[in-house]
Amino acid sequence: MDRNLVSLAGVTIVIAVASVLLTFWRAESFSTPENIALKGLPTVQRETVIFYGFLAVVVGVITWFVYRAMYAQSPDSAAGNFLLLAVGIGVVLTVLAAVVFKMRGFSEFLILHIVYAAGFGWVLPRLLTL
């Protein structure tokens, strides 16, 4: 198996596990009180865990293709530019989460976006260019 695919799978699994643990532990912050009352906390926890676990895999695959394209265009500056792209997307998504969710779960979203930006924007490009 290709070393780059192993790196992608490893980083994606670590980020997915971190996302799942955070969203399971803080599921009540990601959902409205009405939704929790309607469905119950265990159901809300299961839904958030499935969504954010699957989201890490999707983001990992997208990261793979975008970084490969950036690396093909400019190998010398791809890692730095990709980190800036990841941080920029993380900031935009954090602001959007604050607006859409009316600051509910802001710290959890901030932590998730930092983990995603650090893992996919910094760690993964370093492993792919070794």
Image (cartoon, helix red, strand yellow):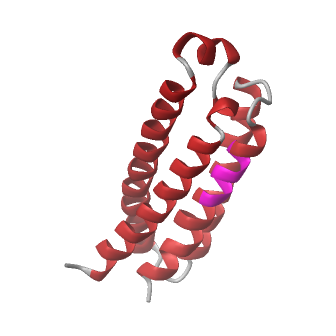
**Percent x, y for residue 5?**
30, 72
**Percent x, y for residue 110?**
73, 48
- Which range of residues does the magenta coloring cover? 109-115
Quarter of the image containing the C terminus?
bottom left
Q: Residue furthest left?
A: 1
The vertical placement of 127 against 27, above or below, is below
Image check: 35 left or right of 20?
right
> Residue at horizontal 52%, vertical 64%?
120
Based on the picture, tell me whether residue 113 belongs to the magenta stretch.
yes
Q: Is residue 85 visible?
A: no
Quarter of the image containing the N terminus?
bottom left
The vertical placement of 1 against 32, above or below, is below
> On the image, which quarter does residue 87 sit in?
bottom right
- Give 113 or 104, whichever is nearer the viewer: 104
> On the image, which quarter does residue 107 sit in?
top right
> Residue at horizontal 66%, vertical 11%?
34
- Give 115 or 17, whichever is nearer the viewer: 17
**Percent x, y for residue 92?**
69, 43
Based on the picture, tell me whether residue 25 belongs to the magenta stretch.
no
**Percent x, y for residue 108?**
71, 44
Q: Is residue 47 visible?
A: yes
- Give 107 or 24, whichever is nearer the viewer: 24
